[in-house]
């Protein structure tokens, strides 16, 4: 089933968050990792702003998605953009923290990681924090088109062996050639329908 989506809310402060309603799946990752591109590719739209300047998205954006189980896809601001000011960084973490720690309808966080680099220091810090909050994480690799197809399997195995938190085998995607996009859509629909019927999740890797 083709997904249909619209932008539901843009929030710069926790007071602006929409009331809890549909289940939410958030997209998190470093600035420039490809969050907006992945959202546009998943939704078949250009709703999310793809930036030439990293660290531009400072708001949390909620997209209302119609598919087999309606849900909200949530675009979180990126982290790890060094030239941002201290005040801005602390505002960023306050907003994200209050959303992630308190939101009861947040059921999954897709953690985007550049397939060329694997998990860097701040990616590991994010994983640890999300794990401590008891949130389910699915690692989604981006920019797979930058790596020769023949090396994908070995690289994926290498990253898994190095250690990462993901409720299932990470999905390797590209916004450039749509690799892994249908697989991710199918995973999300299955995850939502399993959650709705109270089925058990997969064990951690
Ligand atoms: N080759 C390639 N470039 C990508 C891909 N995804 C994003 N990009 C590029 O990476 C840059 C940052 O993308 P963006 O989606 O704005 O990242 P965000 O900051 O995480 O939202 C842009 O120049 C994109 O065109 C991808 O899958 N393949
Ligand atoms: Mg973005």
Image: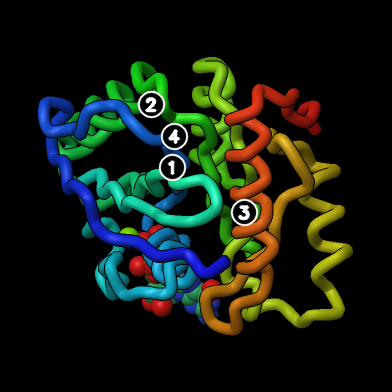
- Gap in angstroms between the C-alphas marked 1 and 2: 9 Å
Q: Earlier in the sequence, mark 4 or mark 3?
A: 4
Determine crowd level at label 1: few under 14, some 14-19, many 20+ residues with C-alpha closer than 10 A: many
Whether tag 1 and tag 2 are in contact, CB under 8 A, the answer is yes
The residue identified by callout 3 is 140
Is the N terminus in the top left, top right, bottom left or bottom right quadrant? bottom right
SS at badge 2:
helix
Nearest the viewer among 105 and 67 is: 67
| Residue at 60 percent of width and 83 percent of height | 177
Pointers 1 and 3 in contact (C-beta within 8 Å): no
Residue corresponding to mark 4: 23
Residue 115 location, x and y as percent? Answer: 65, 63
Asked if 154 appears above or below 170 in the picture, the reply is below
Residue labelled with disc 1? 26
Name which of mark 1 and mark 2 comes first in the sequence: 1
Closer to the eye: label 1 or 3? 1
């Amino acid at each position: 089933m083709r997904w249909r989506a619209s932008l539901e809310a843009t929030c710069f402060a926790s007071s602006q968050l929409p009331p809890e309603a549909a289940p939410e799946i958030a997209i998190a990752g470093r600035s420039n990792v490809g969050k907006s591109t992945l959202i546009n590719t998943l939704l078949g739209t250009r709703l999310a702003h793809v930036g030439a300047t990293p660290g531009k998205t400072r708001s949390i954006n909620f997209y209302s998605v119609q598919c087999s189980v309606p849900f909200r896809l949530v675009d979180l601001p990126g982290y790890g953009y060094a030239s941002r000011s201290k005040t801005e960084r602390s505002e960023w973490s306050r907003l994200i923290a209050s959303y992630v720690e308190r939101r009861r309808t947040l059921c999954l966080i897709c953690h985007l990681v550049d397939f060329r680099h694997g998990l860097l220091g701040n990616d590991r810090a994010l994983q640890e924090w999300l794990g401590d909050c008891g949130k389910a994480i699915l690692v989604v690799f981006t920019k797979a088109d930058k790596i020769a197809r023949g090396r994908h399997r070995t690289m994926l195995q290498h990253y898994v062996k190095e250690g990462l938190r993901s409720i299932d085998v990470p999905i390797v995607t590209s916004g450039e050639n749509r690799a892994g996009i249908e697989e991710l859509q199918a995973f999300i629909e299955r995850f939502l329908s399993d959650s709705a019927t109270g089925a058990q999740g997969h064990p951690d890797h």
